Image (cartoon, rainbow, N blue to C red):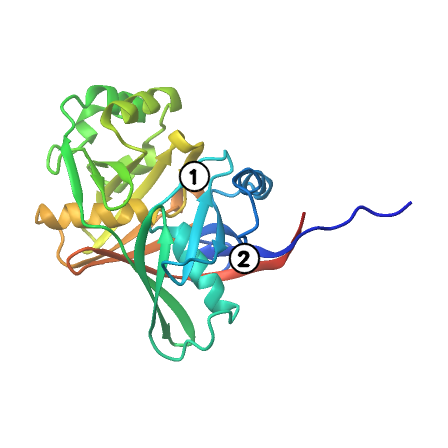
Amino acid sequence: MSSPSRSQVLIAGLIDVFADTALTGNPLAVVEDADALSETEMRRIAREFNQAETTFIMKSERADRKLRSFTAAGAEVGGAGHNSLGAWLWLAEKGTLGPIGSARRFRQEIGGEILDVELRPVDGRIYGHMKQSALKLHPPLRDIVPLTAALGLSPEEVLVHPAPRVADAGVAHLLVGLTDPASVDRAEPAARSLLKVLAGAGAEGCYIYALDPDRPGRIYARFFNPTVGLWEDAATGTAAGPLAAYLDREGLTSGAVEIEQGARMGRPSIIRVSLDPMPEISGAGVVVMTGTLTL
């Protein structure tokens, strides 16, 4: 019996993003040269990989590369976060972009936007730096009782200043400040209730965070995004950028911060964000798997 013909063989793999060592950070599945794939195939492949997100790398007439990213549930996501940073770190680590002996800048097409990404070598590792869109703020949330109930917290644990509100630097997320890191870890969201709050606020995900008085410039955070079928995320660049910009606007931070995320999941991640004046996220990645995808 003859074997079925193989029409497509694609390079694919996994990279841990915002990670200094393997099996930390936020894992991203990557598929190269995905131009011939249909949107349906991309969604099915993302489901097959079953990661928070899978990014497909394609040619672009407007930039150096075009990226499309899908969750395991099939929802397409945009913005400059771990989904796009990981794709560029993947290309750099595999040598596809040529030598990165000094800082090199590229242009990426993602979610209808053209955004810059810069790759810089530091002590033998490659770090990616990505500009996000300018900060847009929605009005503060008026009634926090449904929010606190959805998070499994008491109203006293939610900060009044800065107020909970939706911030957008490419993707709209609800930012919720809590009294301390212990409150962040204590949160136990209820999916249906949180979905209702996010829909009413016009937000995709919910980013809860606390400033750490013992570590100036460090923020402790967790991210929940049931709207795209992603419960908790280990590192969320599209939320980290607007959070840093919002806190800077409120006079609570200055210039640059480090956001620690994923610790509660056992996937510690560090997202570095600077403002110049738009948010710029940065981090490194570790390729943990390479292979071929046969369709």
Residue 2, how many percent across, how many down?
88, 47
Residue 55, how many percent across, how many down?
48, 50
Residue 200, how many percent across, how many down?
25, 22
Residue corresponding to mark 1: 76
Above or below: residue 31 compared with residue 166 = below
> Could you tell me the amino acid type at mark 1?
Glu
Q: How many marks?
A: 2
Q: Residue at x 48, y 64 (%)?
A: 91
The kind of secondary structure element at disc 1 is strand
Residue corresponding to mark 2: 32
Front-lying residue, 58 or 30: 58
Q: Residue at x 39, y 41 (%)?
A: 77
The kind of secondary structure element at disc 2 is loop
> Could you tell me the amino acid type at mark 2?
Glu
Quick one: quadrant of the N terminus?
top right
Q: Residue at x 43, y 52 (%)?
A: 67
Give the farthest residue toward the bottom.
Answer: 101
Which one is earlier in the sequence, the residue at label 2 or at label 1?
A: 2
Residue 210, how many percent across, how many down?
23, 42
In the image: residue 118, left or right of residue 294: left
Q: Is residue 152 visible?
A: no
**Disc 1: CA contacts within 10 A as few (<14), some (14-19) or many (>=20):** some
Q: Residue at x 17, y 49 (%)?
A: 245
Front-lying residue, 61 or 106: 61
Q: Is residue 184 visible?
A: yes
In the image: residue 6, left or right of residue 112: right
Q: CA distance from mark 2 to mark 1?
A: 17 Å
